[in-house]
Image: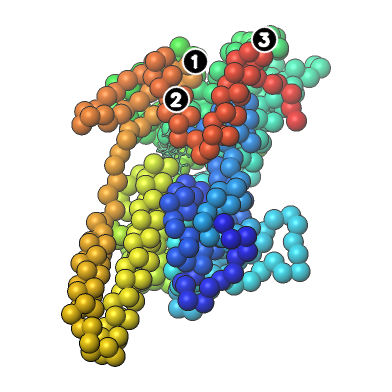
């Protein structure tokens, strides 16, 4: 690429917020020569979230699923500018984004504005807590690399503290009680990975806690994994039973303290009972909430008044009520689930759309130029008119962009003890499968989805390493 990013005044400024699934998939396919592309995100890498639960126990090392945005941008034809910053406010009137460098090291310039002609909001979502007291203060989330590292550290801290000299039996029981709240795929995959870690490694090194380590998964609805078929829900629940993971369904957590979780269970007769459970580690995985910068943008656009879960977009992913703002992924409401699959297809769609828009603008310009020359060179009229017609035909073909259409490839989740569940659409049929073979399918599917060959090799090496030597139980 051109080494220097020199904004070209004849091109539009395309500002992309985020470096997650939506933004990176857009960047991958975008022809960056058509625009002055500026990427803004507090995270200078792409994170392959499907393998994040495996990082909490060291089955996979965290750096294996990160890809620096710098290396992604380096491969583009024209240089792209990247600023490590958070967008704090979007002003659709003035067409500017306020950005703030919130990292540890700040320079003299750390707050400024970036103006855009076109803006893509791909900032994802934050963790939902529903305002439940104590959640933010006492639990771990599982969304970012730092969360996985914190969990990994805490698991071993609980184990070491439980085996401390003269530890009381109640305290041992509390410290070794690992509670996961939320029975969506994040909670289920984490519970499975955690139980594996215990069964395959911790137990070997710290045998005295063998019968005391306990994983509990709490879910407010009547069953876990609501997006999977009934058969796979049953399979997951029976596998968890074998793995000795306790599932508490119809149980909603209402309050969290530093050592206890208070949850309300609704019985078959509708009667509600409160339960207080002491815990050592608490992982909170109850889904998504809207980020403040997105909420603020929504409040400025009257057409977003009734939208609750994010920026309502039309079938071309244009934010309703705006002309030059698009949104993808978890911060957009397009009628699909907030998944990586959806975000990456939306990103790829926007790349096609923007490439086409640039092409058609170029042809429009050519037609305009030819039309003007028609007046200046009356001799060549027939030839020029023919050329204009060709361009117009080309333009019609290009402009015929179909709206965004999502193709669901299926749902996959790891459930522990080398088993996975999959609802996959294939050759117009649907397959629901669970078990060891599905686990191999899960591994190969996720491997093929990894960002780069480097990531793929690192993940395979991590899998081999943890299989051969066991997971590392040092608390670093
Ligand atoms: P993200 O990927 O979250 O990216 C958001 C980006 O915006 C990040 O780079 C972030 O740093 C940046 N950002 C945040 N705030 C700002 C700001 N103010 N200004 C600028 N940038 C900002 N989906 C699947 O389909 N399959 C799976 O197996 C799967 N597994 C998952 C496992 C886990 C543990 C989790 C948490 C999620 C999983 N998902 C999975 C869901 C999937 O990760 C999300 O749907 C996907 O990440 C959404 O993509 P996105 O681009 O909208 O947001
Ligand atoms: P989710 O929204 O899918 O599930 C959260 C669960 O928490 C819900 O079932 C909800 O009933 C429960 N819950 C909410 N409040 C509660 C409370 N107070 N007490 C007890 N339970 C409560 O969230 P997720 O699992 O983080 O997933 C988020 C998105 O990411 C989803 O779209 C999911 O499909 C996707 N994802 C996919 C995969 C995969 O495909 N393998 C893995 C992880 C995440």
Q: What residue is rendered at 64% in x and 36% in y?
A: 63
Quadrant field for ligand 2:
top left
- Quadrant where the C terminus sits is top right
Q: Residue placed at 29% from the left, 90% from the top?
A: 376
Residue 444: numbered disc = 2
Q: Quadrant of the N terminus?
A: bottom right
Q: Residues within 10 Å of mark 3 (few under 14, many from 20)?
A: few
Q: Secondary structure at mark 2?
A: helix
Dot label at residue 417: 1
Marks 2 and 1, how far apart in space?
17 Å
Judged from the image, the secondary structure of the residue bearing numbered disc 1 is: loop
Looking at this view, is 378 or 99 the one in front?
A: 378
Q: Position of residue 196 (x, y in %)?
A: 55, 18
Q: Quadrant of residue 98?
A: bottom right
Look at discs 2 and 3 and give the one toward the viewer. 2
Of marks 2 and 1, which one's residue comes earlier in the chain? 1
């Amino acid at each position: 690429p051109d080494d220097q990013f020199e904004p070209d005044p004849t091109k539009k400024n395309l500002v992309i917020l985020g470096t997650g699934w939506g933004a990176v998939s857009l960047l991958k396919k975008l022809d960056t020569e058509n625009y002055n592309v500026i990427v803004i995100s507090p995270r200078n890498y792409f994170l392959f979230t499907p393998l994040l639960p495996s990082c909490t126990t060291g089955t996979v090392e965290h750096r294996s699923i990160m890809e620096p945005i710098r290396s992604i941008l380096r491969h583009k034809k024209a240089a792209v500018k990247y600023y490590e910053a958070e967008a704090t406010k979007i002003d659709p009137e003035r067409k500017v984004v306020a950005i703030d460098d919130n990292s540890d090291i700040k320079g003299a310039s750390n707050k400024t504005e970036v103006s855009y002609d076109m803006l893509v909001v791909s900032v994802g979502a934050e963790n939902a807590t529903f305002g439940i007291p104590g959640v933010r203060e006492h639990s771990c989330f599982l969304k970012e690399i730092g969360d996985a590292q914190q969990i990994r550290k805490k698991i071993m801290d609980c184990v070491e503290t439980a085996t401390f000299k003269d530890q009381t039996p109640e305290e041992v029981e509390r410290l070794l009680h690992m509670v996961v709240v939320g029975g969506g795929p994040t909670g289920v995959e984490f519970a499975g990975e955690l139980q594996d870690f215990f069964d395959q490694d911790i137990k070997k090194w710290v045998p005295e806690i063998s019968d005391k380590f306990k994983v509990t998964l709490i879910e407010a609805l009547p069953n876990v994994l609501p997006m999977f078929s009934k058969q796979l829900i049953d399979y997951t629940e029976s596998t968890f039973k074998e793995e000795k993971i306790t599932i508490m369904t119809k149980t909603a957590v209402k309050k969290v303290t530093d050592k206890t979780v208070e949850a309300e269970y609704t019985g078959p007769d509708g009667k509600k009972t409160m339960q207080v459970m002491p815990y050592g580690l608490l992982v909170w995985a109850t889904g998504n909430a809207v980020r403040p910068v997105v909420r603020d943008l929504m409040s400025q656009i009257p057409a977003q008044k009734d939208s609750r879960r994010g920026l309502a977009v039309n079938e071309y992913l244009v934010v309703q009520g705006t002309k030059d703002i698009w949104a993808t992924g978890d911060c957009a409401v397009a009628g699909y689930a907030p998944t990586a699959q959806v975000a990456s297809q939306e990103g790829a769609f926007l790349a096609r759309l923007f490439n086409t828009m640039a092409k058609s603008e170029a042809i429009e310009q050519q037609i305009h130029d030819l039309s003007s020359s028609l007046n200046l060179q009356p001799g060549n009229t027939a030839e020029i008119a023919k050329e204009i017609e060709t361009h117009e035909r080309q333009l019609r073909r290009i402009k015929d962009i179909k709206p965004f259409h999502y193709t669901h490839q299926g749902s996959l989740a790891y459930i522990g003890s080398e088993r996975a569940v999959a609802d996959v659409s294939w050759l117009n049929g649907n397959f629901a499968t669970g078990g060891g073979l599905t686990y191999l399918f899960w591994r190969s599917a996720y491997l093929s989805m990894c960002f780069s060959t480097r990531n793929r090799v690192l993940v395979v090496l991590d899998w081999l390493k943890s299989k051969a030597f066991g997971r590392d139980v040092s608390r670093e």
